Image (cartoon, rainbow, N blue to C red):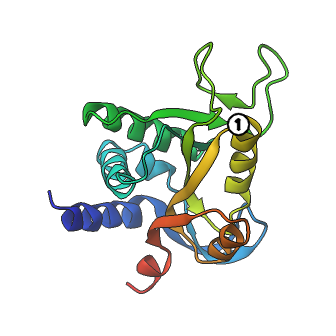
């Protein structure tokens, strides 16, 4: 399937499984009359495959070592992209950042690294399912930087166009999106 065909098909899946209208309070605390819950798309076999395919294609020139982000939204994305990257012969390892470190065991905030592995000096992309203001991704960026990683990009599946671009620009972090919310609102 061509990139444009994959993109059109994924948009249809997101619209059917993950987009809705009606008043909702977003993670940012803002109210909205539309929402995206990408988990049904991320956990759908075709949706997961298309998200991974289009994301990996969008990231192909970024020379990445790791891909990850804040739990829960980043977990299925990072896993699917990591798996496809290995299958395509360009492996990018995955991790996730806990919202709060566990209170038992190793008490880690960054999870998924094997004993002896580190993000120190590695090129990392932070992924998100839906981005509004960028606050959740900034938490992941901070944790990765605390672990010594170099965040080269924040990449989201859907940018709601409600301040994230400006927030990341102010923080000096490149930001890209697979889709903009307006692509779903105009249809």
In this rendering, the count of numbered labels is 1
Residue at coordinates 72% horizontally, 34% vertically from top-left? Answer: 147
Horizontal placement of 14 versus 149: left or right?
left
Horizontal placement of 1 versus 92: left or right?
left
The foreground one among 47 and 152 is: 152
Residue at coordinates 34% horizontally, 60% vertically from top-left? Answer: 13
The foreground one among 52 and 92 is: 92
Q: Is residue 70 visible to us here?
A: no
Residue with the mark numbered 1: 148
Residue 184, image quadrant: bottom left
Farthest residue to the left: give it.
Answer: 1
Residue 1 position, x and y percent, is: 14, 56
Farthest residue to the bottom: give it.
Answer: 186
Label 1 environment density (alpha carbons within 10 Å; few <14, some 14–19, many ≥20): some
Residue 51 position, x and y percent, is: 37, 52
Horizontal placement of 100 versus 65: left or right?
right
Residue at coordinates 59% horizontally, 25% vertically from top-left? Answer: 112
Under tag 1, what secondary structure?
A: loop
Position of residue 61 relative to residue 23, above or below, is: above
Residue 127 position, x and y percent, is: 54, 51
Q: Quadrant of the C terminus?
A: bottom left
Residue 120, image quadrant: top right
Residue at coordinates 42% horizontally, 46% vertically from top-left? Answer: 63
Position of residue 28 relative to residue 186, above or below, is: above
Farthest residue to the right: give it.
Answer: 103
The foreground one among 25 and 42 is: 42
Position of residue 66 relative to residue 134, above or below, is: above
Q: Is residue 62 visible to us here?
A: yes
């Amino acid at each position: 399937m061509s990139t444009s065909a994959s993109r059109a098909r994924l948009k249809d899946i997101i619209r059917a499984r993950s987009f809705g209208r009606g008043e909702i309070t977003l993670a940012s605390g803002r109210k909205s009359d539309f929402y995206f819950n990408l988990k049904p798309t991320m956990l759908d076999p075709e949706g997961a495959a298309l998200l991974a395919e289009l994301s990996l294609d969008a990231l192909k020139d970024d020379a990445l070592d790791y891909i990850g982000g804040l739990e829960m939204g980043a977990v299925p994305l990072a896993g699917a992209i990591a798996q496809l990257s290995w299958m395509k012969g360009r492996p990018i390892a995955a991790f996730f950042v806990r919202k709060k470190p566990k209170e038992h065991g190793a008490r880690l905030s960054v999870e998924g690294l094997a004993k002896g592995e580190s993000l120190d000096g590695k090129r990392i992309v932070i992924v998100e399912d839906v981005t509004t203001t960028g606050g959740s991704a900034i938490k992941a960026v901070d944790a990765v930087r605390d672990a010594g990683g170099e965040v080269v990009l924040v990449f989201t599946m859907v940018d709601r166009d409600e301040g994230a671009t400006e927030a990341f620009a102010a923080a000096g972090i490149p930001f890209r999106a697979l889709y903009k919310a307006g692509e779903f609102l105009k249809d």
